[in-house]
Amino acid sequence: MIFKDFFIISLSLLGGYLTDSFLTTLINKPFFEISITYLIFFYWCYAAPQQFSLIIVMVTGFLIDFIGASFIGTHILPFLLFSLIIRTYAYRLRLFSHLQIGLIFALLGSIGFTFKYLFLYPDGYFYSKLLFNFISYILLWPLVYSLCRHIRRNYIFDIK
Amino acid sequence: MASNTPLHFSRFSYFLCIIFFSFVLFFDTKDNFLKSLRIIQTSSVITIDLMTTNIFNFFSSWLDTKDDLKKTEAQLKSLEQAYEFLLARQFIFSDESNLLEGDNLVPAFIKNFDAYRYICCGVHEMLISENSYLYKPVLNSSGLIGQLVDSEGNYGKLILLSDSRHYLPVSFGSIYCNANGRGMPMDLYCTVEKNSFETNDILGLPVFTSGLGGIFPKGLMVGSVSRVTTSENSTEISISLLADPRTSPNIYIIKT
C-alpha cells in the first residue's frame, strides 16, 4: 500500500468521525448515535483485507483516538479485534448478501459500541441508543459501501 | 480470486497488540498517563481555530473595503459582551450573600468544548481562558453552568453541573438535597426520602442553591423540578437546568 492510499483511507475514516460528531451535535439527543466511522472501517477491512494490515489498523485507530481526544485504545482495540475477525473470514463474507453483511457488521459494531460505553463512558449508555445504533448500521451499510467503493475505484489504484 | 481462498496472516501479532493496547487503555483510563497527548490535541484545535480566524480576518480586511460595516460588527460584539455581563450581574443579584457588592464577576471565555462527547458520552467539561479562582462557581448570561476544578496549562478546567462527578446542594420548597449530574445534558437528579411531599406540589417549582457546602452562594436559581419518580424507599427528582453552557462563549467566575 502506497502512502496516498493510506492517506485516503485515513481521510475517509476521519470524514466518518467528523460526520458522526456533526450529526450527533446537530440532532442533540443523548439517545441518538450513529457510527459511520466503524462502517467505513468495516468496508476497508472487507474490501482490502490483504492491504489493510495490522500496522495500518493501529495507526488509523490511533489517529481517531488522538483527533477525538479519547483515551488511547478506545478505537485501536475494537479496530484490532474487528480487523482480526474480518480478515479471518474475509473472502467468505463475500458470499453473503448486503443485508446479511449489514447484519454481521451491525453485530460487530454493537460490540464496539458496548465496549466504548460500558468501559469508558458509562454515563452515556442507553439501551435505546444501542438499538438505534444497531438499526442505523444495517440501514447505512449500503450507502457507506457505495461511497467507499466509489472512492476505492477512482482514487486508490493499489487496491483492486 | 476465489471466494473461499484463505488469507494468511499472523494472528499471534494481533493478539499481542490487543493485549498491549488493553494495558495502555487500562492505565490511561486509571492514571491518565497519556494526558499529554490529549493536551496536544486540545492545543492543536485551539491553535488551528486561532490561525483560521486570523487568516480569515487578514483576507477579509484585505478584500473588504466596507470599514463601517466592520466597525459596526465590532461594536455589536462588544455590546453583546456588555449585555451578557449585565445579564450575569442581574442573575447573581438574586443571591442572599450580597455578591453585587464589589466587582465579583471575572469575565472569561470558553476555549475548548467537545459538544459531541457532551451529548453522546457524558463528558461534561470544558477548558476556559481563566485558571485562577480554583473551585469557584461559573455562570453564563442565563445562569450557573459549573465549577472551575483544575488548571491545564494556561487554561482552567471547568466541570459542568450535569457532570456525574459534580454535586450541588440545592433547595426547593422546604426540601434540601444534594443534586448530582448523571452525564445527561441539562439535567440534575436528587434523591430524597419517600412521602416527604406531594408530587404535584413540587412539579415546576424553582430550584435554588442552598448555600450548604460553602462553594455556591445561597439563593441562586439553578432550574426547575421537571419530573418526580417514586420507588419503594425513595423519590427521585429530576431538575431541568436553567442555563445551557452552549449558548455563548462568554462566561463569568464568581470570585467570592
Image (cartoon, helix red, strand yellow):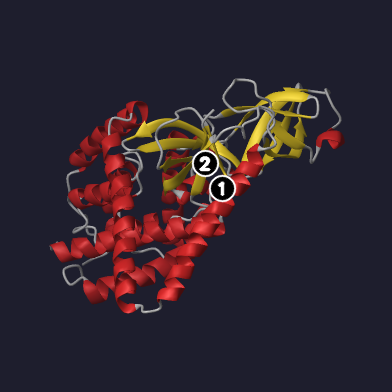
Chain to which the residue tagged by mark 2 belongs: B
The tag on residue B85 is 1
The residue positioned 49% from the left and 35% from the top of the image is B159
Instruction: Give the quadrant of the C terminus of chain B.
Output: top right
Please name whichever residue, A118 or B108, is drawn nearer the observer in this view of the structure: B108
Measured along the vertical axis of the image, is residue B58 above or below residue B51?
below
Measured along the vertical axis of the image, is residue B40 above or below residue B95?
below
Please name whichever residue, B190 or B22, is drawn nearer the observer in this view of the structure: B190
Measured along the vertical axis of the image, is residue A122 above or below residue B49?
above
Image coords of residue B129 (percent x, y): 40, 42
Q: Amino acid at mark 1?
A: Phe
Please name whichever residue, B94 or B110, is drawn nearer the observer in this view of the structure: B94
Q: Amino acid at mark 2?
A: Tyr
User: At numbered mark 2, what does the secondary structure look like: helix, strand or loop?
Assistant: strand
**For mark 1, does the 10 Å Cα neighbourhood hold few (<14), some (14 to 19), or many (20 or more) residues?**
many
**CB of mark 1 within 8 Å of CB of mark 2?**
yes
Location of mark 2 (residue): B252
Image side of residue B248 versus residue B230, left or right: left
Image coords of residue A88 (percent x, y): 27, 50
Image coords of residue A9 (percent x, y): 26, 62
Q: Residue furthest front?
A: B102
To the question of a shared chain for discs 1 and 2, the answer is yes
